[in-house]
Image: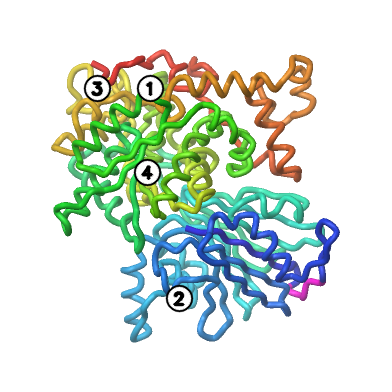
Amino acid sequence: MCGIFAIFSRDSKPVGTQVLHGSKHSLREMAYRQSGKQRHRGPDSTGVHVIAEDGVAMVHERLRIVGVERGDQPFVSNDGNVVLVANGEIYNYLELSAEIAKRLGTYKPKSDCHVILELYEVYGEDLLSHITGMFAFALYDKRTKQVLLARDPFGIIPMYIGEDKAGNMWVASEMKCLVDTCSKVETFTPGEARFGRVGEMRTFRHFQQSWIKELPTNPCDLNLLRSSLESAVRTHLHCDVNFGALLSGGVDSSLIAAIATKIMREKDPYYRLKTFSVGLADAPDFKAARHVAKYIGSDHKEIVFQIDEALDGIRDIVYHLETYDVTTVRCSLPMLLLTRYIKSTGIKMILSGEGADEIFGGYLYFHKAPNCEQFHQELVKRVQQLHLSDCLRANKVAMAKGVELRVPFLDTGFVNHVMQIRPQDKIPGELNAFAEALGPLRRIEKYVLRAAFTENYLPDDVLWRQKEQFSDGVGYDWIDSIRRVATSHVGDEEFAEATRRFPFNTPTTKEAFYYRCIFEEQFPVEGAARTVVRWVPRLDWGCPEDPSGRAQAVHQVNKDVII
């Protein structure tokens, strides 16, 4: 995982010297300078490729994970006509490499993303139907002056697109690279691609599934569910550097760590996965995480933070996240402290459990779903907005410290499998109709996921532990403290002007108002505020607006199991 940046001139003509903050810059200098704002994403190398006669500059900030020795970008085709900058991981690259080798006679990919270049030569824009993974990329074809931009189905990898006053197109992994050069910016939609000359590009969906618009009818098969997740984790272990796993003690991260351990021990029976937890001294997550670590035999480390040191980073976290969403800011500050420590240990890739709550209905407010149809519709909405919340947080916080974070639950094949399961098998509470759900346990969220892994994967008290949102699980005092401190920065008179000052996404609390003010100061460009969607439970289901899991009536304080 890395950072990409590109400038494509509107008429494919040379771009003259540009002035920024009083200084003159050539196209190459401008590209290098602006990409530097996301250089934390690629601390290992920076690559720049300029096609001056076409007004094109492409930059790659690299974190070396796969193909360490040969994978520096931008990639250029053998004839020099096609240039690629790509961010992410292509999980089926070994299979694709074998197919490419049959066509070329011999082929050894420089890295997993190098296959994109070779596939383009054969399939053009249709290459997107052949790759599986998390990705965002920009490709330029010098022969046709055409650009191909694409982002993975769920937006695991961030990408933004902007336009300057001359109509030139700018692309970057992080919005901060665009705000002082573009007159407007927008989020590149997950599952979409754009192809053509600048100003004439055609947008199309490369990811379309029936479950997005139709109510699924497939009954849940626990054996198939288990094997599907194990396969997803296996593909996410392709890595040429040391890696570890986040371990909160919740069922999602615990299952990923347990499965990864089983797979790695196929080759090394004594393998110990490095796992990490973060929290205040009395964090609810610590006890459960210790139990899991002992059960799976991991090399576990707890990072205990103080409230003040996390609060010091509020402005920094808004800048790194590029959002003012309350839930995302709350969750991200402890995680930033954790990834900084992980980086210091020499680990460059970590596994995490993001995505399970969205595809299985794990958030506690899902207990309020009035029927199976609305439950499924809410799942679809949550999946489609992952790039604005959990994926955004997971990627940008980890990459702020140069660490790649992988999310096996969001493997494309696994998401499609789970989202095609009929909602009555997944819905929590009394509406759950899964045939094998016995007694009161059927009331717990993510029942089928838990039931699929009852055979020696996790301790029962963790496998059946109630959902604890990350910002709550690190310690209940954390939410109370950050809310109090943020609120103290906003006076009553100032907050009374919220609607006038912020007519779009108007803050409804002083905490939200404070984050919004910081965001507007850091990202003063048209469209920036509209890249954010607030994460709130379904108010029309009778849920409180506060996103904390503790605010939901079903939350069981200090109880590990619903019985």
Return the x and y of residue 225 as percentages of the image width and height.
24, 42
User: Of helix, strand and loop, which one carries label 3?
Assistant: helix
Q: Amino acid at mark 1?
A: Asp
Sequence-wise first label, 2 or 4: 2
Q: Residue at 65% of width from left, 63% of height from top?
A: 201
Sequence-wise first label, 3 or 4: 4
Q: Is residue 343 visible?
A: yes
Disc 2 marks which residue? Answer: 118
**How far is disc 2 from disc 3 in space, using C-alphas?**
49 Å
Sequence-wise first label, 1 or 4: 1
Q: Amino acid at mark 2?
A: Glu
Q: Amino acid at mark 3?
A: Arg
In the image, taking residue 227 as reference, residue 484 lies left or right, namely right
**How far is disc 1 from disc 4 in space, using C-alphas?**
22 Å
Return the x and y of residue 354 as percentages of the image width and height.
40, 40
Q: Is residue 535 magenta?
A: no
Q: Quadrant of the C terminus?
A: top left
Residue 352: which numbered mark, if any? 4
Residue 62 against residue 426 in the figure, above or below: below
Disc 3 marks which residue? Answer: 442
